Image: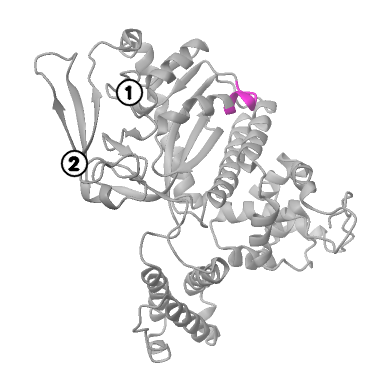
Amino acid sequence: MISNQETLSLSPFLAIYDIVVPKDNMLRQINELVDFTFILEELKTKYCLDNGRNAIPPIRMFKYLLLKSIFDVSDVDIVERSKYDMSFKYFLDMAPEDPVIDPSSLTKFRRLRLKDVSLLDLLIGKTVKIALEKKIIKSKTIIVDATHTKARYNQKSPKEFLQEKSKIVRKAVYQFDEAMKEKFPPKTTTNEVIDEVAYCEAVIAVIENEPKIAHIPAVKEKLNVLKEVVEDYHERLHYSADDDARVGHKTADSSFFGYKTNIAMSDERIITAAIVTTGEKSDGKYLQELIEKSIQTGMEIDTVIGDAAYSEKANIEYTKENGMALVAKLNPILTQGPRKEEDKFEFNKDAGMFVCKAGHLATRKGRTGKKGTNNNQKQTYYFDIEKCKVCPMREGCYKEGAKSKTYSVTIKSTVHSEQEVFQQTTEFKEIAKSRYKIEAKNSELKHVHGYDTASSAGLFGMEIQGATAMFAVNLKRILTLLKEKE
C-alpha cells in the first residue's frame, strides 16, 4: 500500500544535511532540478492505496535505481553506501537516522512495479522537457547511432560461467591472504551445474567467515557479484545464456553476445530517444522511430546526422518528405531499393556483410553475373552451411541436403543522385563533423555508467538499465550546461 499524501519528516537531525551536503553536490542539484512526483503518478496503479502494509515510497525505490546507475555498483553495495553517505540519504528523502531497505527489495521493485511501464520513453522525455524549459536545447539537429551491450550471461556453459565468477573472487582474496587457499573447499570434479553452485556457495561462506577479508572493498564487490549470480540461479531455476540476447557483429572478424541500443541525441548532447533491441538487429531500421520519439518529447528537427547504416532508401525518402536533411553517406548495398527476403537478411555495416535472422554472419562475398555491366551483376554472400544445418530457424531458409547457402543483391550504379550530390557539398561535410559527439556519449554510458555489460538477463532488464543510465547522463549534462550559462 502507498499513501496519496507525502509524509513530513520531523527528525531533529535534518540540519545535518545543510552542513555535510553542499549546494554544489550533484545529488542535491538533481533533487532541486527534478520534481520526482511524476514517478509516483506513473506507478500508483501498481500499488494498493487503501489496503495492506505501507510500501517503501516508489520515488525512493526509483532513486535507489538511479544511484545504482550513476555510481555503477551492485544492489547490495548501493544500499550499504546509503547507510552512511549523507548525500545519498538526502537524495533519497530520508532522515539521517532512518534505516535503509533490504537489497532484495530492488529486485522485486524492478520485476513487479516497473513491468509494463515505458520507463525508457518516460525518463528520456522528462529530461528533454526540463532541457527545453531551461532553454538548453536550441538546435534542431539530432545525431543517431547504435551502441552494443554484452549480455551478463555469456554463451559459456553454465558450469564455466560459475567457475569464472568464483575464480575472480578467489584471486581477489589471494591478493590479501594466500593462506586462504587452504580454507577453500576442493573444486568440483563433476559436470553437474548444481555441484558448481554448491561449490560457489561454500566459497561465499568461507569468505564471510573471515570478516577481515570479506570487508575489504576489492573483495566485497566481487563477492557481491558472485552472490547475485548464485541467487539468480535459484531464482531462474536454471542457468543458461540470456534467452533474449543475440549475436551481433562489430566487424567482419569480431562479434558480441547481447543487445543494441539505438540512440538519438541533440547537438547539445542531450539524449532525445532510445530503442533497445537484441544484438543482431540492423541500426538503420530504427531511424524513423527515433525521429518520431524525439519529436514526441517536444524536439523540432530539421537535420539528422548518422553513419552509412542510416542511408537506406526508406530513410532518405522519409526525411525528405518531412523536410529534414539526412547527413549520412550512401552505402551502395543499402541504397539499392527493394530486395527479396528483406525480413530474413539484414546488412551489418560494421562487418560489411549480411546477417541472417538467427544472427549468423556471411563468411565471404563475391560478384556474380556478366562482367562489364552493373545492370545484371549481383553481390553474393555465402553462409556457413554447417551452421545452417543445425540452426533452430532453418525451416523455410535452409533446404535439406543443400551444399551451400547464399544471399544475393543486385548491384546498381545510379541511385539517389540528389543524395550523392548533397554529400559532396561543403554543408554536408561540415555538419557531418558533429557525429563524434554521439560516440563520446556512448563511451560515457559504457565506461562511467556500466552500460558495457547488462546488469541482468532479458530485454526487459536491459530497457530498465538503459532508462536509468540515460536519465542519469542527461541530468548530468543539463547541470553542466546550466552551470555554463551562469
Compared across the picture, whether 424 is left or right of 453 comes to left
Q: Depth check: 86 or 239 in front?
A: 239
| Secondary structure found at label 1 | loop
Of the two numbered discs 1 and 2 on the same chain, state the one appearing first in sequence: 1
In the picture, the quarter occupied by the N terminus is bottom right
**Which residues fall within the magenta stretch?**
293-299
Specify the farthest residue to the left.
371
The image quadrant of residue 353 is top left
Does residue 486 show up? no
Does residue 286 show up? yes
- Separation of disc 1 and disc 2 at Cα? 20 Å
User: Which residue is painted at 36% across and 45% down in the image?
Assistant: 358
Q: Depth check: 262 or 266 in front?
A: 262
208 is within the stretch colored magenta: no
Instruction: State whether residue 471 is above or below residue 202.
Output: above
User: Which residue is painted at 19% across and 23% down in the image?
Assistant: 378
Amino acid type at image mark 2: Ser
Instruction: State whether residue 396 is above or below residue 210.
Output: above
Q: Depth check: 401 or 477 in front?
A: 401
Q: Identify the residue position indicated by label 2 in the image.
A: 404
Q: Identify the residue position indicated by label 1 in the image.
A: 339
The image quadrant of residue 473 is top right
User: Which residue is painted at 75% across and 53% down in the image?
Assistant: 58
Q: Which of the labelled discs sits on residue 462, or is there none? A: none
User: Which residue is painted at 29% across and 23% down in the image?
Assistant: 331
Amino acid type at image mark 1: Arg
Q: Residues within 10 Å of mark 2 (few under 14, many from 20)?
A: few
At which x and y percent is residue 296?
Answer: 63, 25
At which x and y percent is residue 398?
Answer: 28, 42
